[in-house]
Amino acid sequence: MGYSSCIFIISGPSGVGKNTLISKIINDPEINIVRNISTTTRAKRENEIDGVDYYFTTQHEFQKKIENHQLLEWTIYSKNYYGTTQESIEHVLGLAKNIILEIEVDGARQVIDSYGDKYPLRTIFLMPPSLTVLKQRLIERNLNQSEDIERRLEIAKNEIEHSHFYNHVIIMDDLEKEFYNLKAYILNEIKNINH
């Protein structure tokens, strides 16, 4: 099946500002784009809504999805499972909408390796200005214990090492500037796919 829309894979370390930037993008009326809702085994945060922010599930149910080949990609991040169902992606693309997948580096590689020829894909990496700034953002979130912050920083170092595999890298220093950078990139890529 040919698609006239595109999958935009957005990755970046925890605390870099992915959710904030993606929310601004999907709420922009100029862009025909929706956010994929990932499935996760991590605990739901106080302000999150099941089926809106994530589909929250048990590890047992997630394992069933893996065994039944229902996931486009999946990974373990900070001891929790995260994944994207094939059905949700194909449904959105079938409606001629563009979609954002907010996934980790390993998941992005899975999608590119397995589906890069099937779907139009573009990859974007959101880079922190520095690890010091990233650590401060994680502390300000006040959601993580010290050892969890250090583990997330180690993961971030690994993710940053793989940023050169992405089509587009944005340094997350100024949210408004980065929003317009990402918006211009997405609109240009959508235009290129449709011509």
Image: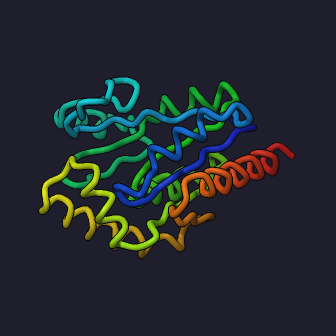
Q: Position of residue 130 (x, y in %)?
A: 41, 73
Frontmost residue, 54 versus 1: 54
Q: Position of residue 138 (x, y in %)?
A: 28, 57
**Displayed quadrant of residue 156:** bottom left
On screen, residue 74 above or below 31: below
Frontmost residue, 37 versus 142: 142
In this image, 184 relative to 26: left or right? Answer: right
In this image, 79 relative to 117: left or right? Answer: left
Residue positioned 60% across, 32% down in the render: 27
On screen, residue 13 above or below 187: below
On screen, residue 70 above or below 17: above
Q: Position of residue 83 (x, y in %)?
A: 36, 42
Residue closest to the far right: 195
In this image, 132 relative to 168: left or right? Answer: left
Residue positioned 26% across, 70% down in the render: 154
Q: Is residue 144 visible?
A: yes
Looking at the image, how many numbered discs can be counted on the residues?
A: 0
In this image, 114 relative to 60: left or right? Answer: right
Residue positioned 46% across, 60% down in the render: 109
**Displayed quadrant of residue 31:** top right
Residue positioned 75% across, 38% down in the render: 4
Frontmost residue, 45 versus 177: 177
Q: Position of residue 42 (x, y in %)?
A: 22, 40
What quarter of the picture does the N terminus occupy? Answer: top right
Q: Is residue 3 visible?
A: no
**Displayed quadrant of residue 34:** top right
Looking at the picture, the colour scheme in use is rainbow
